Image: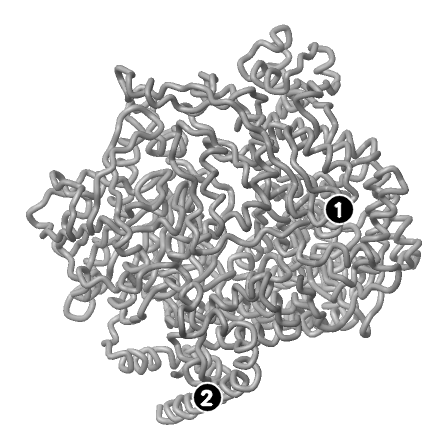
Amino acid sequence: MRHILMLVVSLAGAAVVEAEEAITQRGAEFKSVVAPLLNRYCADCHGEKNPEADLTLPKAAGTALERANVAVWKRVYEQLENGQMPPEEAKQPTSAERRQLLTWLKGTLTDAGVYVDPFKLLSPARGNWVNHEALFSSRSGETTGTPDRVWRVTNTAYQQFMERVIKQFRIDVNPLTITHPWKLQPGHDFSDYSTSHRVGEAEIAVHLRNCERVAQKIWSNIKGHQTSPIKLAIEAGKSATRSQIEGVVKPLFEKILNRPMEPAELARYGDFLTNNLRIMETDEAVEQFLIGVMFHPEVLYRLEPVEGARAMLAPRPLARSLALTLTDREPDPVLLKAVTDRRFGSRDEVRQHVERLLDDDAVPKPRLLGFFHEYFNYTKAVDIFKCQTTLKELGIPIRGDYQPSVYVADTDRLIESILQDDKHVLRELLTSTRMFVLSNRTPASARTTSEKRLREKALPDFGHTGEQKLVLSTYEVSITVEDWLDYKPMNMPADHRMGVLTHPSWLIAHGTNFENHAIQRGRWIREKLLGGVVPEVPVTVNAALPDEPDQTLRARMRVTRDAYCWKCHRLMDPLGLPFEQYDHLGRYRSAEIVVDQTATQRLKDPTKGRAMTTAPLDLSGGIELSGVPGLDGPVQTPLELIRKLADSERVEQVFVRHVFRYFLGRNETLADGPTLVAAHKAYRENDGSLKSLLVSLLTSDSFLLRTHAVEERTRP
Amino acid sequence: MIHRRTLLKGISAGTGGLLLAPLLQKIEAHAAGTDATPKRIIFVLFDNGFHEEGAQPVGVPLATDKVKQLPLKDLTLPFDLEPFAPWRERMTIIQGLRGFHLSPSHGAGFGALSGLPFSKDQAKGESIDAAVAKNATTVFPLLVLGIAAGQSSATAFVSSAWGGGRPIAAQCRPEIAYETLFGSVGAKRNTFANRKNLLDFVKGDLNLVRSQIAGPERELLDSHLDSLETMTKRQGELSRRYEAGELTRHAPMLPDKPALKMTEIAAAQCDIAAAALISGLTNVVTITSGLCGLKTTYTGLTNSGVHLIGHGTTDPELMLTGYQVLSRYRRYLAEQLARLLDKLQATPEGRGTMLDNTVLVFTSDSANWQHSGGENWPFVLVGDLGGRLKGGQFVSYPLTNRPLQFGVPGQRDTGLAPRSNPTINALYCTLLHAAGKPRDTFNHDGTKEPAAQYGPLSELLA
């Protein structure tokens, strides 16, 4: 016991010394680097006399490191990091100076136990921070490529791996009962970046359980075959020779991972099985070995390392990256064969396969629609709950008649059809008046035979159920039962609607349970079409509109006009307000329904709901501060705004940037400029073809090359 | 200040870190001026709000212009809280805390336990359960269990986090939680030893990949490896306990069939929590019902959707209003928790029982109603944590009464706290003091709160 105590004491001593050294160093850095910068750029407003925002910066090295100052440094770090400070009109630190400050602040905060997100700059929300003009004025030339990396696979890819293993070994496990170790939540920004989710204890535990189940079944299957060479070899148990061991390890490993095994791997996994056989029962030993293979990093990640400082990905990882990027699954047999035959690796060979995969309709490509799901974020419509009272106030007495999943399915179908034509894709998405109607309600789209039968039975009554009437009147179209069964698109009234931004799915998704959300709609346009940056909501803001049910949304949004709020709201509100043309169920309207306070007060039984009245619409809005010559200016209707946007080259470029992000799993940097210029060019020259855009992106240096160095990230 | 983790890391490289754990616990306890008896906290969150009338003692008006403190022994507990009646002498009912900065409408998500704004879907910082559990030497520093009927996922990240970007999963399947803690039911093999062996091996390949990557994702591999390391150690310790027969001794009985209904899952998770506490596998448990945001069902109680119930819509089968169903829901949870508390009370510890060193924190992640803006956030504490909490009292910070009509016809009284009232962060700060881990404030940095409200709350501390 005494030894242990001494160890504790001596280690404790070492830790204290280490901590003290760190503190001394931070103190020295404060004096030499940080204090002079703070004096130059911040002290005028944040000194001791009447400091702005009640924030006084600590001056002396000693006080700077005191615990009490942690909150101050946290605020400073946030403001500096997101570019809100110093204010626009003040003199700005150079990016090197800013970085020096941030590094010191990050170190000091981390020492104090405050978490500083290392991936904030790399997060999808920061995509637009890279200067647009600088990106698109790049001349063709070398890009640096993507840093070597790992990228955790998606749920779908994980599921598909498990399915393949289950199928290949013909084991009795229902693939649907395999639990995903992680679930990426789509939100306002792309959910699946290489940096966006950590594999932690929970994920490992779930994966472990999946593997345990599958491994047990695989082994019992192998055992069941009397003549299986693997079975015979393993029967030797502890006394199995090395070659017997390898005779088990190699085929199983290769079958599970679907690739040849490297000699070093054979040695490692061979040792693992040998050791297992020594310390466990034979059954357990083999099962544990199988789980070990299924725990290979390749199952959970795309591995994209590089030999040397900068090179193309090796053929096998490249094939896997390409397949996962486009199809969300492992490479298909054709691609695998090309790798084995050494016919995959050059840029031209990559191009052939990209084109093949894109052109072959038999190859499922869920990531294409997946991109639009996350880009437009319209699928969220199904999560926006509308209660009975709200629907009643909007003239829908039966809650079940309102089915937002219909609108989502219809938008899906339109996007698929636009991708099929592959002409002027973005323009079509923004301006098409075509609309598929009730497309997930046809007998053909039924999931079960009984459902199908029910729907066929209801055919003569088509157009008369509450749900169908609501959908048709929302789109303002009529359709014959024959056209509907043929999935014929109808045209919505061109003076009322055009494009996805006027689809009920998008409008509902960008609304709340009770009303429209003009701010969110405006933010979407600012970020996803204009490529602008909207700062995060400051923690000091209680972001709520006044509770005045007799007022229109626009009137209640007057609070955002307060000078402090308007700085940011100016970037969103005028873009979102024209969409007040529609109610929060996505229906075209000519007046806004609000509560009639006087009439409500006169009601005999005030507990039985509220009396409603209408208020006139004001749809005015416009584009401000876009930074694009000729684009800014007022608009009077949503369609006018959409037309302006659809005509803008900037909007097209911003779209290209988003396609880049989704398919490369990271934000673009200035070094990716040539890739983006080329991709945009390919899109334009091929009449707005998404396929051409993707071929260009997936054969670019940005996609093919990996660099082995910590890259410096660009600041706005 | 010695960082315990640094210390443990250094030691485990040479000798067995776990061997030293009790020793360190004592050294630390001594340094903190506390005795070595572990302090246990059980956090319970439920969805759809803790309606004022579900917490307020019967007949006590909600509105008060001063801080009100009344002994509970003279008061009648509301229907929802009756199951806690045996412990009314060491129970605290709190009204009047604020949480508007957490936007708790439809559930505050991570904000409910962290007190940090903009945390609905994302862990922006440490949660209170993690703060209490931090540096614990138990096999599971923090056990998070979910009650999520109707959800297919086995785990969910909703309530707890070690820090920003480091959420802790809630285990929503009782049978998996059981197996994680106590091993397979009736298992003949020591699965823990096998898992340790496996995870040790798995680290090798991952380390190899890590050595090849210089990009920012390297940090992700680091945390993946850290998790593997933690799990390996845990499996090792569980394996040891399994061999010693310690795990089966405390393992609860699980129902024959997997629990599917909300009522069954709640009962099973409470059994598991009790066993984990009694066996000393953990001292901090969080149980989150409804996954902090109306994502589940109340099967077993009602077939109506949770959302409609929260709106007060009448359940056509039960012929009860949604609010009455919610009241039953809270009471049902309280009944299950009362069973848990009973078990702790039946387990001797020192000169008393385990319950003496425990506190249950019972609240909603949605404050006082489904669409709450955090104007009032009712809490119930059961247990006095070794006499550190006052207990046996009703405490209300100043409140005005605001009649609320929501969803269905009819009104109910809700509380509206003035800005000068403390926030729920102050309560969490108080809990840290009571648990022997005092801090000046809990996650108040950056919010514009008057320093006087940072906590701890003197009304609650003994």
The answer to whether residue B16 is seen in the rendering is: no
Which residue is at a point 39% across and 29% down the rendered structure image?
Answer: A549
Front residue (pair B217, B41): B217
Mark 1 or 2: in front is 1
The correct choice, above or below, for A118 with respect to A579 in the image is below
Marking on residue B271: none
* Residue type at the position of mark 1: Pro
Q: Are marks 1 and 2 in contact (CB under 8 Å)?
A: no
Q: Indicate which disc, 1 or 2, sits on the residue closer to the N terminus.
A: 2
Which residue is at a point 60% across and 69% down the rendered structure image?
Answer: A91
* Residue type at the position of mark 2: Glu
Which residue is at a point 34% across and 62% down the rendered structure image?
Answer: B284
Query: Which image quadrant for residue B369?
Result: top left
Question: Residue A186 location in percent, x, y?
Answer: 59, 45
Quadrant location of the C terminus of chain A? bottom right
Residue bearing mark 2: A20
Task: Determine whether the residue tagged by mark 1 lies in a helix, strand or loop.
Answer: loop
Residue bearing mark 1: A629
- A569 left or right of A307 in image: left
